[in-house]
């Protein structure tokens, strides 16, 4: 089992930045891919970013590419999401996800472990 705890959400003005963190605990000695998803009210869960176990590969959808950066520190069992140039449409609950694989995955159903989510609100 892997437990995930997100932090760093909050209220920010459009154009601002936030950095989310996700700390993993439990069976963190096995390789696992990590990702961020988000869910706005009345919408489905949307893929935001994913990173390979080694950190050597990342992937983003076009909606956030160039503005968001995912990174990880395996010595701290933590993954980060740096969000710059935030827009009101980025407003959502952001979830951290992990699963035991070395490859990069982008579909929510492929992830086994989930955090409780952290709210990000971008005002216009």
Image (spheres, grey):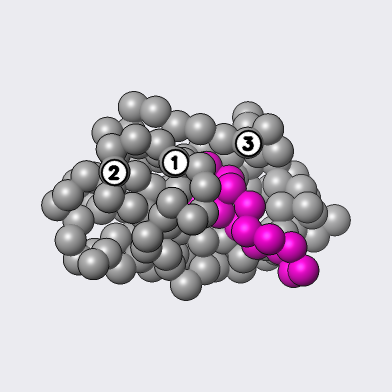
Percent across and percent down for residue 13 are 75, 55
Please give left or right for residue 16 compared with residue 42 in the image: left
- Between the residue at mark 3 and the residue at mark 2, the CA separation in whole angstroms equals 20 Å
Q: On screen, 9 above or below 98? A: below
* Quadrant containing the C terminus in the rendered view: bottom right
Element class at badge 1: loop
Question: Is 24 in front, or is 44?
Answer: 44
- Residue 27 pos. (x, y %): 18, 61
Q: Nearer the viewer, residue 77 or 85?
A: 77
Q: Quadrant of the N terminus?
A: bottom left
* Residue 76 seen in render: yes
Residue 12 disc label: none
The reply to whether the C-beta atoms of the residues labelled 2 and 1 are less than 8 Å apart is yes
The answer to whether residue 98 is left or right of residue 2 is right
The quarter holding residue 51 reads top left
Mark 3 closeness class: few <14, some 14–19, many ≥20 residues within 10 Å: some
Q: State how far apart marks 2 and 1 are (Cα).
A: 9 Å
Q: Position of residue 116 (x, y in %)?
A: 47, 72
Magenta segment = 36-49
- Is 47 part of what is drawn in magenta? yes
Task: Choose the circle earlier in sequence order: 3 or 2.
Answer: 3
In-image side of 50 versus 46 (left or right): left
Q: CA distance from mark 3 to mark 1?
A: 12 Å
Q: Which residue is disc 2 drawn over?
A: 101
- What residue did someone put label 1 on? 105
Pointer 2 local density, CA inside 10 Å: few below 14, some 14–19, many at least 20: some
Answer above or below: position of 98 versus 11. Answer: above
Mark 2 element type: loop
The residue that disc 3 covers is 61
């Amino acid at each position: 089992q892997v437990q995930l705890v997100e932090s760093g959400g909050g209220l920010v003005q459009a154009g601002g930045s936030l950095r989310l963190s996700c700390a993993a605990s439990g069976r963190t000695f096995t390789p696992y891919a990590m990702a961020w998803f988000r869910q706005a009210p009345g919408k489905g869960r949307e893929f935001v970013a994913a990173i390979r176990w080694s950190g050597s590969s990342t992937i983003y959808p076009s909606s956030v590419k160039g503005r968001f950066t995912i990174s990880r520190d395996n010595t701290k069992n933590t993954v980060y999401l740096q969000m710059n140039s935030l827009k009101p449409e980025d407003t959502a609950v952001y979830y951290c996800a992990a699963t035991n694989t070395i490859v990069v995955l982008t579909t929510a159903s492929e992830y086994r472990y989930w955090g409780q989510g952290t709210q990000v609100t971008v005002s216009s």
